[in-house]
Image (cartoon, rainbow, N blue to C red):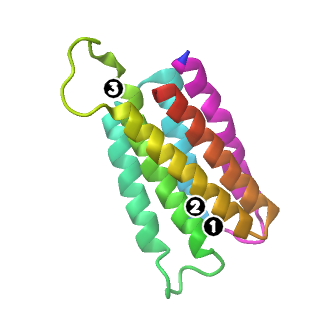
Amino acid sequence: MSEILHAWAVAPAAVGACCLAADRARVRPPEVAASVLMLVAMLDAAVFGVVAPVAWTALLVAAALGLAVWRRPRQRRAPNVPALMTLHTTLGMVVMAALQIGMGAHGGSPGHSHGVALAPFLLAIAVGYAGLSVVVAKRMPARLDRAQIAAMAVSVGLMAIAAV
């Protein structure tokens, strides 16, 4: 069941990437690249499994940090990108990275575990991200931005349910 949910989470991520790429009023190559990276990571984790989840996690976190530095406020390289949109995208990459680890952690035996359970933590950050998505979507004037935010939130929600 979790594999099916994870595969279904790819669809809203693809819709979000398309919404971001279709916004011709504001060309945002770094955000499009981040969206495509998340989509490829999800697709690989759901279908192919070529790259280890830990590697995807490291790459997603590094890309989130890179995007945050690239789009930091008061810089000439951030022309028409709202700060909330950058915050939503970078946090989305971090949440996706955590969910990649959660999706890859199902291999152990059920009777042998140490430490804190990962599923409640993943569910909590997904719910927090969904709440942030609602706030950010209400503040975005452009329909494509709201669609991209909603698609990302749905994708994270489906991945979180699959990880639990």
Type of the residue with mark 1 = Arg
Quick check: is 147 in the magenta stretch?
no
Residue labelled with disc 3: 105
Image position of 160 with respect to 75: above or below: above
User: What residue is at 53 percent from the left and 38 percent from the top?
Assistant: 40
Residue 158 in the image, given as x and y percentages of width and height: 59, 33
**Which dot marks residue 141?**
none
What stretch of residues is rendered in magenta?
Answer: 2-27
Q: Name the amino acid type tagged 2.
A: Glu
Residue in view at x 46 percent, y 65 percent: 67
Look at mark 1 in the image and give the residue it sits on. 28
In whole angstroms, how far apart are the C-alphas of marks 1 and 2?
6 Å
Distance from label 2 to label 3 (Cα)?
28 Å
In magenta stretch: residue 14: yes
Which residue is rendered at x = 55% and y = 55% of the image? Answer: 33
Q: Depth-wise, is mark 2 or mark 3 nearer the camera?
A: 3
Label 3: how many Cα within 10 Å (few below 14, some 14–19, many 20+): some
Q: Do the residues labelled 1 and 2 touch (CB within 8 Å)?
A: yes
First in sequence: mark 1 vs mark 3: 1
Q: In the visual, does 143 lie left or right of 112?
A: right
Location of mark 2 (residue): 31
Name the residue at the right extreme. 143
- Quadrant for the N terminus, please: top right
Measuring from the top left, give residue 131's x and y in whole percent: 59, 54
Q: Give the residue type that dot 3 points to.
A: Ala
Element type where label 2 sits in the image: helix
Answer few, some or many: residues within 10 Å of disc 2's Cα (few below 14, many 20 plus, some between 14 and 19).
many
Q: x%, y% of residue 5? A: 59, 24
Q: Is mark 1 on a helix, strand or loop?
A: loop
